[in-house]
Image (tube, rainbow, N blue to C red):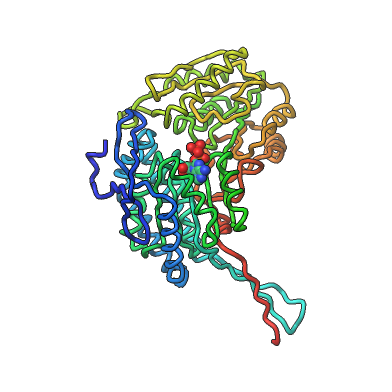
Amino acid sequence: PLATLNDPTLLKTDALIGGEWVAGSARFDVHDPATGLKLADVALLGAADTEAAIAAADRAWPLWRAKTAKERAAVMMKWFGLLHQHADDLARIMTAEQGKPLAEARGEVTYGASFIEWFAEEARRIYGETIPTTDNNKRYLVLKQPVGVCAAITPWNFPIAMITRKVAPALAAGCPVVIKPAEATPLSALAVAELAQRAGMPAGVLNVVTSNADGSIAVGKVLCASDTVRHLSFTGSTEVGRILAAQCAPTIKKLSLELGGNAPFIVFDDADLDSAVEGAMISKYRNAGQTCVCANRFYVQAGVYDAFVEKLAAKAQGIQVGNGFEPGVNQGPLIDAQAIAKVEAHVADALGKGAKVVVGGTRQGERFYTPTVLSGVTGDMLCAREETFGPVAPVFRFETEAEAIALANATEFGLASYFYSRDVGRIFRVGEALEYGMVGINTGLISTAEVPFGGVKHSGLGREGARQGIDDYVELKYLCLGDI
Ligand code: ADP
């Protein structure tokens, strides 16, 4: 699938350290999840290369931070333009290694690029403040300064956006970065890094250390243990987030963590049902259910339960599953065999405990799973507690508003949540009661570069995007000026 790129030189397979492409002493294979075929072999780097990348970033720091915000923004805007210019190729690379349908991949390129544009604009607005004095002989000032070398460890479900959302605020603030992309999707990361080079990013400001699953553990250890690295941003599972946080404790690093979710999607009796079904489709089946904000549990009030299940099943049945390069396909493969196994386990568990398959419930070939709706789902089932991360919609029945809120909050996670209601009082009550970082009300799509994305409880620390997305990449410095 990569033979037809308009610009074949975007297909990079070496890592990027200090402006040089590094082949490494070993390589690892990257596969097309739709076919299982090998796409490329990529540099498998380890601990020593990671040290080299950190050192390169550290050397680049003084020059990058010394540039004016406008100068940094100019490089970023050029990079942003190049992502758009090469959007078709980037989408092809992404579909090939990640599996999402081409149109969805194209959408991610636009979404991923939007973080570069947004933070390039925000670079010039990293304002400090002056504080009214309590002593006329003194003045108090607060500066915001770049935190230093930043590390980013990113997942495979959004191979470009999860990188730009971390790297763009770092660059805007004046920090260099070392990126460790997911082992399943390094080609998208390297293509985007190549475009940063073409945009004139100074050597060492943006480094990409690629590795396989085992190697990533070694790379992660070095990034966490380094005293030079002053901030680590991670998106991925809560389990790995916990490991990284522990590894970062000795160096008291700043941490941004965007971890697992278990998003509830509540439909009240007073909801616009067609709109709720439409929102459910987007929230559940996008990226084959492999996003951390995908609805994981549907709670539907008794009065509309049957109608909702029927309408959702009818729509889900219309999803065309297949290779993301084929026209008309709107759901690709799951990322790997483990992902399929988890979906199958959740469905089998639910059926074993009394749930019913309304539609779907089957694997197609090795890597595809049919869009599924389960009814009669109860709280004792695995899908009520764990993120399925696949195209399965378990639908629970509830009676009262208080019950729905209690069920939605009965999880250690707190990333995204959704509810549908046309009652303004209820919208405020439920919106305020949900223990989540984000609440979608009468919509299934909430993310954009301008808003603070992030979770509470075991779903993470910090916010990405928005004005606040810069905060984790700067330190406040207080200047106390005496002898006025
Ligand atoms: P997912 O469930 O999305 O695969 P993971 O949390 O397993 O998420 O992985 C997300 C990212 O974290 C990937 O880049 C992966 O290589 C990396 N990773 C996984 N385990 C570790 C680890 N122990 N140390 C450092 N990075 C890790």
Vertical side of 442 occupied by 56: above or below: below
Left or right: 156 with respect to 231? left
Q: Nearer the viewer, residue 328 or 234?
A: 234
Q: Please tell me which residue is depicted at 69% across the width and 72% down the height of the picture.
A: 131
Vertical side of 24 occupied by 422: above or below: above
Image coords of residue 110 (percent x, y): 40, 46
Image coords of residue 147 (percent x, y): 55, 63
Left or right: 338 with respect to 329? right
Q: Please tell me which residue is depicted at 35% across the width and 52% down the height of the picture.
A: 15
Q: Please tell me which residue is depicted at 61% across the width and 45% down the height of the picture.
A: 460
Q: Nearer the viewer, residue 198 or 47?
A: 47
On the question of residue 390 being in view, the answer is: yes
Vertical side of 445 occupied by 318: above or below: above
- Position of the C terminus, as image quadrant, is bottom right
Image coords of residue 127 (percent x, y): 57, 67
Location of residue 102 (image quadrant): top left
Image coords of residue 197 (percent x, y): 33, 59
Q: Please tell me which residue is depicted at 44% across the width and 20% down the height of the picture.
A: 370
Location of residue 30 (image quadrant): top left
On the question of residue 84 being in view, the answer is: no
Q: Nearer the viewer, residue 458 or 127?
A: 458
Location of residue 57 (image quadrant): bottom left
